[in-house]
Amino acid sequence: MDASDVEGKGKAGRKDKKSKDAADAEKDAAAGKGKDSKSGGKDDKKQDREPSTIERALIRPLMTVRKLKVRYTEDYGTVIPGYLPQSKLLGMNQFTSPGWDFVAGKQPNINPDDYYTNKDWLHKNWQWITPDLEYALPKNITQSYEQVIDGKLDLEPYTDFRVTVEAKRSKGRNHAEEFRRYEDFGGDPIQEEFKHANITDYGQFTTSYSALNTLFDKDLNGLFQQFEDNKLIVANRLGTGVHENPDSAYLGYPKGYGPFSQNVLLPAFIAAYTGQDANTMKVSDNFVGDVIIKTIPRPNWRLTYNGLAKLGGLEDIFQSISITHGYQGKLVVNSFDTDRQFDRNDLTKLKETTLDYYSRFEIPDIQIDEQFAPLLGIDVRLKNEMSFKTEYKNSRQLRLELIGTGRLRETKANEYTVNFGYKLKETKIGFLQPKKKKKGGAKKDDAKKPPIGGRPGQRASQSTPGDMDFTFDLSVRDDVTNIRELITGLVEPDRGSRRVSIAPAITYQLNNQLSLRFFFDYTKNTPKTSQGYPTTNIRSGVTVRFSL
């Protein structure tokens, strides 16, 4: 046998082995196909299956809520100077004082309504307070309380349509008093007794609010007249209902509740400017504590829809279309303080000036702020680098000042803005382009050197045309503030103006480091009172910016 025969036999053996392996693979594949063909088809069908309309209708509401956040916090604090027992173990003295509840954080009851009763923590434990007047007198017992409630809910009822609802309320209250020993030398032996003195309660309050019923009412005089009419209604509900009372400083008003009483003004104001009925709304001699501070937060919201560009053939033209709408409102009591002349033991005590009953709390002012930010906003971006944005905002601020005879500040503002932008890519401006280098002028090694601020292998950007941005901004704002005197009804503009602003600009990017901006700003301000004068400001020029 020669060499050629051996070689041919080896080739034949490899060929037979290969054909045998292929046959086994085909046999296994056929067996697997016959066994799993049914199940494999079902799995593929399940994966490709789309949910039905009924399934979508049932599942989608469950997916509407995207995020829910609720926060509730309370902070308490009590400071009692002149405490005699010494703290030994866990803040306690022989496990009796100041008590496990106090050490655990429970606040002692220091409520003026429970003074000199079994609920009065200070009077019940007077032996723990030092009788040393020099030590205790300059320092007040203080108790503080702060509560914050807020929540935020994100909804998505439909694809690209989002709704955000928010509500918040915060209130703070502080109590201060002197609890010390008063000596009575009228008898024998000397009687010593601890008493409460110089009691003061003060605080502040803010809550999300809504007064939409009258926000778009242009009849401001009509709203103020409703406020005036509500005062008599509220006064008669608080008083005896007798219209002609000789003890009243104003005819038609019952005793103790005149047209400038705080307990009359506050509910009359809230009813008039929130669209409530003064005959049915809640009133109280302590309107701040019983009504305002217990106000339930009203929701504020913001709506955003981004799916308009995906409808029909719009996606070929528009990159995005965003429509927004939002509302924010709040009720603010910046401060309230105990009326020092108020006597809880004599609620019929009258003021000498107005013959009104004293209120438990004095409020310098109460304020309602609300705004649509925006009422409607549209932001459009096209695929050809063009953009357009417009917004219309509307706001109102009401501030009732209760100092003296009182007055009402009304501020209304409207604002309309338009923003336009367009970008031209790779724009060439002849005189701004660098001159071409002469042939042979550059050295061979220069091509290997990186450009300034670049990396090796990176070409210089000086010869690459830059982008040119065109922008145009237009803003028109109109606002006015009127002061209405409650005692005379006189209306006087306090401030206000009409402001028009136009600002076109062109920005040209020469390269990665250098840019030029040509701008022109025009602003015209026309005041609505005699205290100011019309002004027009014009700014224009060129800004050169070089970035390292």
Image (tube, rainbow, N blue to C red):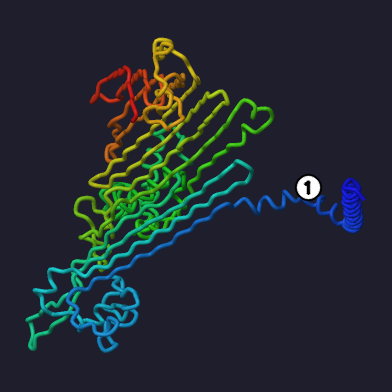
Which residue sits at x=33%, y=59%? 172
> Residue reaching furthest front?
2
Q: Is residue 19 visible?
A: no
Toward the viewer: 325 or 546? 546
Q: Position of residue 214 (x, y in %)?
A: 45, 39
- Count of labels in the image: 1
Residue drawn where x is 39% and y is 19% of the image:
443
Q: Quadrant of residue 459?
A: top left
- Quadrant (top left/top right/bottom left/bottom right) for the C terminus: top left
Q: What amino acid is labelled 1 in the image?
A: Asp
Residue 86 x, y percent position in the rendering: 20, 83
Instruction: Return the residue nearer the eye: 123 or 265.
Output: 123
The residue nearer to you, when weighing 469 against 112, is 469
Q: Mark 1 packing: few (<14 Cα in 10 Å), some, or many (20+)? A: few
Q: Is residue 525 left or right of residue 447?
A: left
Q: Nearer the viewer, residue 52 or 201?
A: 52
Q: Is residue 302 left or right of residue 170?
A: right
How far across and how far down the image is residue 470, in percent? 45, 20
Numbered disc 1: secondary structure: helix
* Residue at the spot 27% in from the left edge and 47% down from the top edge: 402
Q: Residue at x 29, y 68 (%)?
A: 77
Q: Position of residue 457 (x, y in %)?
A: 46, 30
Which residue lies under the disc numbered 1?
A: 48
354 shown above or below 451 = below
Residue 32, compared with residue 323, is above or below; it is below
Query: Horizontally, is 15 left or right of 90 in the view?
Result: right
Residue 497 seen in the current view: yes
